[in-house]
Amino acid sequence: PRSGRSKTKRFDHFIDSLAKMHHSKYIHFLFGRIEILRGEALQRIFFLVPPAIRKLKGQSLIKDWQVNCVASIQLGSLEAMLQAFSERVWESYIGFVQHQYYLSKKPPPINSAGEVMAYSRKALSLLTLAITTMMALTYTGSY
């Protein structure tokens, strides 16, 4: 009925406004989605993603944390996996992202501390690889 049409019009206006102001994929970074299995039904819960996470979605340290978090969750029951994931997010991710967001508002070079740390980590890995390769090529054996 009437309320359904006005709801649809408001939603369409919202989507059109987003498309005019931002890239069409922006809405994927504006809202997060969690799917919870309740018995036989799959319940979808949508929420607004905090500004700190939206702004820093591409920062390498945060992406590394996300990948490591997903990889470190041990397989088991769904409840245990969800519990472990939510504990890791509450205990470290939120504070880490907020701190990186705080640093991003500082003047240079502090505002790029996360990127400098990620670059340094990669450079150290490459240096270690180069030293190991040189040692392997020059090694002639023991006595």
Image (cartoon, rainbow, N blue to C red):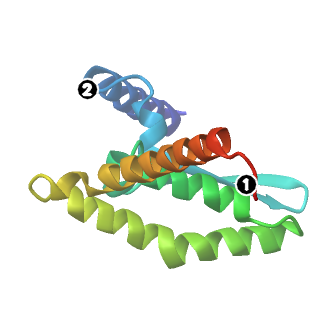
Q: Is residue 24 left or right of residue 21?
A: right
Q: Which quadrant would residue 68 be assigned to in this image? A: bottom right
Q: Could you say which disc has been placed on residue 43 in the image?
A: 1
Residue wearing tag 2: 21
Q: In which quarter of the image is the N terminus?
A: top right
Measure the alpha-carbon separation of dots 1 and 2. Answer: 31 Å
The answer to whether residue 46 shows anywhere in this view is: no
The picture places residue 95, in percent across and down from the top left corner, at 40, 73
For the view shown, which residue lies furthest in the left direction? 107
**Residue 57 placement, left or right of 38:** left
Q: For the residues labelled 1 and 2, say whether their Cβ atoms are less than 8 Å apart.
A: no
Density class for disc 1 (Cα within 10 Å; few <14, some 14-19, many ≥20) is few
Point 50% across, 43% down: residue = 126
The spot of residue 131 in percent (x, y) is 53, 47
Amino acid tagged 2: Met
For image coordinates 31% across by 68% down, the residue present is 99
Residue 90 circle label: none
Give how far across and how far down residue 5 sits, in percent. 48, 30
From this viewpoint, is residue 131 visible? yes
